[in-house]
Image (tube, grey):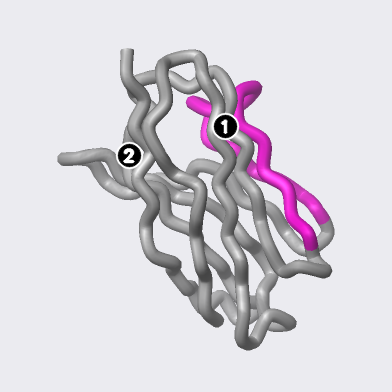
Amino acid sequence: VQLQASGGGLVQAGGSLRLSCAASGSIFSIAVLGWYRQAPGKQRELVAEITTRGSTNYADSVKGRFGISRDNVRNTAYLEMNSLKPEDTAVYYCNSRTYSSVLYWGQGTQVTVSS
């Protein structure tokens, strides 16, 4: 599985960004697509994830502000980020988990929220 992430950038607090994660390769093995993030000096943490059937899971810190969706035809997951805060600043990584629990990672994309 290969994952191509895009959509990061610089935005002011309160603004919005949309991240995309396009999967290719053994796409039928993918059970879950998601996004993690890692801020400087901190551990990588789950932001949001979505299953093939559309079940979602969010970190408490982003609930109500972020929305994850999945286009199974385009094999792409989207992370809509609204009401961004400076503490959302991090490198965001696309992630997939197969039905056999193998993890794949895409390259990171920087999200910077200025105050």
In this image, 8 relative to 101: left or right?
left
In this image, 38 relative to 57: left or right?
left
Residue 21 badge:
none
Of residues 47 and 80, which is closer to you in this image? 80
Residue 97 within the magenta-colored segment of the rendering = no
Residue 69 within the magenta-colored segment of the rendering = yes
Task: Please name the amino acid that badge 1 sits on.
Answer: Met
Q: Compared to 29, does 108 lie above or below?
A: above
Helix, strand or loop at mark 1 = strand
Q: In the rendered view of the protein, which quadrant contains the N terminus?
A: bottom right
Q: Quadrant of residue 90?
A: top left
Task: Please name the amino acid that badge 2 sits on.
Answer: Ala
Q: Are marks 1 and 2 in contact (CB under 8 Å)?
A: no
Residue receiving disc 2: 90
Residue 81 badge:
1
Of residues 35 and 110, which is closer to you in this image? 110
Magenta residues, start to end: 54-71
Q: Compared to 14, does 35 lie above or below?
A: below
Tally of marks: 2
Q: Position of residue 102 (x, y in %)?
A: 51, 78
Residue at 67% from the left image edge and 36% from the top image edge: 67
Q: How crowded is the residue under tag 2: few (<14 C-alpha within 10 Å), some, or many (20+)?
A: many
Q: Position of residue 96 (x, y in %)?
A: 56, 67
Q: Earlier in the sequence, mark 1 or mark 2?
A: 1
Helix, strand or loop at mark 2 = strand
Residue at 42% from the left image edge and 55% from the top image edge: 93
Q: Position of residue 39 (x, y in %)?
A: 27, 39
In this image, 10 relative to 50: left or right?
left
Q: How crowded is the residue under tag 1: few (<14 C-alpha within 10 Å), some, or many (20+)?
A: many
